[in-house]
Image (spheres, grey):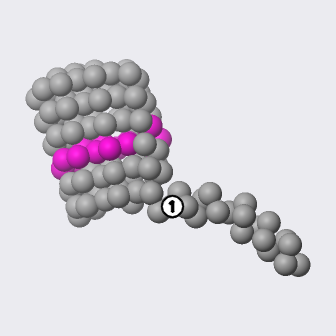
Amino acid sequence: MKKNIFILIASLMPFLVQAQTTTNYGQGSGTQGYYSSYFGYKAGQVNTGFYNTFIGSSSGYNNTTGNYNTFIGEKSGYKNTTGIFNNFIGRHSGYNNMTGNYNTFIGEKSGYKNTT
């Protein structure tokens, strides 16, 4: 019995440790995902992806399973859902990007109409 409990605890340890790796600050900002940081009102609100950084009001707002993204600025990457390896810096940069991967947009509204 003790051996079974030890095996159960050992197998759950990675999940318990990962649950402690998200940092958030701001009303309604994300609390899920692994190794992610959210700073700002509703930043990363529904994110479950990993290794994301969203800084600014509603940045990464709709991101669900997108990974390895950095969005800095109000509503940057706002509609991104599953896009990966994106870097958007500036207010509304990459706003309509939903599934686009490996994009870099720098400046206000840069890449605003990009979707894929």
Q: Quadrant of residue 22?
A: bottom left
**Closest to the observer: 78 or 13?**
13
Outermost residue to the right: 1
Q: Position of residue 96 (x, y in %)?
A: 27, 29
Q: Residue at x 85, y 78 (%)?
A: 2
Q: Position of residue 69 (x, y in %)?
A: 36, 35
**Closest to the observer: 77 or 7?**
7
**Main SS category, magenta section:** loop
Q: Position of residue 17 (x, y in %)?
A: 55, 61
Left/right placement of residue 58 relative to residue 97 reads left
Secondary-structure class at tag 1: loop
Residue 23 higher or lower than 4, as above or below = above
Left/right placement of residue 2 relative to residue 78 reads right
Q: Residue at x 32, y 44 (%)?
A: 53
Q: Residue at x 86, y 72 (%)?
A: 3
State whether residue 103 appears in this view.
yes
Left/right placement of residue 3 relative to residue 45 reads right
Image quadrant where one finds the C terminus: top left
**Closest to the observer: 9 or 55?**
9
Outermost residue to the bottom: 1
Left/right placement of residue 6 relative to residue 17 reads right
Instruction: Please name the residue that numbered disc 1 is placed on.
Output: 19
**Few, some or many C-alpha atoms within 10 Å of disc 1 (few <14, some 14-19, many ≥20)?**
some
Q: Amino acid at mark 1?
A: Ala
The span picked out in magenta is 52-67
Outermost residue to the left: 108
- Label tally: 1
Is residue 26 a member of the stretch shown in magenta? Answer: no
State whether residue 79 appears in this view.
no
Residue 18 higher or lower than 55, as above or below = below
Image quadrant where one finds the N terminus: bottom right
